[in-house]
Image (cartoon, grey):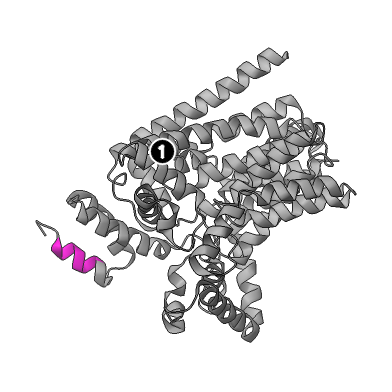
Amino acid sequence: MTAKSRFALVCLIVFVAAVLRLIFLHQFMLSDFFDCPVLDMRTYLEQAQVVARDGLAGLGVIWRPPLYPYLLGLSLRVAQDSVLPAMIVQVLLSSLSAGLVYLVARRFASDGVALAAAALYAVHWLAVFFSALLVGTSLFVFLVLLALWLLLLSEAKHSPWLILAGLAAGLSSLVRTEVLVCIVAWAAWIAWRRQFARAALFAAAAVLPILPITFHNYRMSGQFIPVTAIGGYNFFVGNNSTADGKTVWASKGALYELAVPEDLSPLENQSRYMEAALEDIAEHPARFAGLILKKAYYLLNAYEISSNLDIYYVISDTSPMLAVLALLSFGILLPLAVVGLVFGKYDRRAAAPVFLFMIPFALVLLGFFITARFRSPLIPLLCVFAVLGATAIRDERRSLLTGGRTMLLMFLFLLVFCNTQFFGVADPRDNLEINLQQAFAFQGRQKTDACRKILKRVLTVDPRSVPAIYLWQQLPEN
């Protein structure tokens, strides 16, 4: 295949990705959910509105990664408070990410594998879903893939590519701070090969986008806060004695009992949460070990744990297209990817930066809690290894009952393991609070039918829900 043909195919894949995302964006805009954001989506929108009015200074000490609300705020200022331009940009970034999957994969695998992986990510339902939500997922995935591609490219090119890789990595940390662990791993990998100057150059470039936020936090609080002041809180939510490893709601009682004073400084506040979580861990180490195992199971399971919207309810209510695409679930993608990782034909040494993102990122997730949004940045890279896995199975199909038995048994075991719902992974009670907040948002916008519909969902799970009963009684014609 010629370079021109490959370029044309990649452009076609990006175009298909954009069409699917625009279709879902249109469907989402026509739904009742579009102008009734709740939880993180509402918070990001409120922060963006502050930025549009007062700039970054209006946010005070940064307690959530600032890049997404900052860019959203700039968009609101230019577009006169319309979120549509920002959503179209998200669609564009998510579509271009499919092209980046190709560019990353072709650095360590064949062109055919890279093209198939890009196509797989283009149609992956969760990537399409998050491209229409007011969260930073599409921006983060784009920046991580860009950083990975530039880092892989810098192995064969000169230092400017390494500098650009560091800048992209640093920017990604302003969307999701967990990636800081991966940045350290990348720098350590470069230094381990005795390329100390290149490691220092990469690290300096990665720090550069972070410095303005660190300076902003120091100016606001007088304390050294590199990016955000929420790490201790999130660690407590994910690891205290009542944590379930997948929802914030399980920790509400513990948060209430802890009662952190409001007059603490940002660092003191986060230290208090961290100390409380560590005390719970030290007091009940067996419980903590079991919690980590549960989170590992949640991380590998096919079920997508919601965090801002009841995901499966939204797609069933708004998008038959996504409901069909969702048949290619994480529970199929992951078993194929593991087979590809172990048995696939690719340059493992060249793929080292990919591993140094996936492994540290997954481990950091286990330290907090697991949701669909949090684990979704792993999906584009899993698409690459899933194609390698499918290729390995195809190439060995004649020997699967002889020499290829290990591959077949691994795939079948993971297929069962990832698609079996144990340990409350799909507990319908997890979405009660999400749906309740959405119901109140619907009521506030006078969307009575939508409110009634989602309240029925809540009351089916918990017929005694006091907030749901109260809200139901407030609705007309009841």
Q: Residue furthest bottom?
A: 283
Determine the residue positioned at 28% across, 64% down. 459
Q: Quadrant of residue 142?
A: top right
Residue 215 magenta-drawn?
A: no
- Give the magenta-colored segment's residue range: 468-474
Q: Is residue 473 above or below residue 53?
A: below
Q: Is residue 283 rendered to the left or right of residue 318?
A: right
The quarter in which the C terminus is drawn is bottom left
Q: Is residue 385 visible?
A: no
Q: Is residue 405 rendered to the left or right of residue 246?
A: right
Determine the residue positioned at 41% across, 53% down. 44
Q: Is residue 154 visible?
A: yes
Determine the residue positioned at 51% across, 25% down. 16
Q: Is residue 240 above or below residue 352?
A: below
Spot occupied by residue 45 in the image (x, y as percentages of width and height): 37, 51
Most frequent secondary structure within the magenta stretch: helix
Spot occupied by residue 399 in the image (x, y as percentages of width and height): 82, 36
Q: How many marks?
A: 1
Pick the residue in front: 86 or 415. 86
Spot occupied by residue 270 in the image (x, y as percentages of width and height): 54, 73
Q: Is residue 111 above or below residue 341?
A: above
Pick the residue in front: 342 or 164. 164
The residue that label 1 is drawn on is 86
> Quick one: SS at disc 1?
helix
Q: Is residue 84 above or below residue 61?
A: above
Determine the residue positioned at 64% across, 37% down. 146
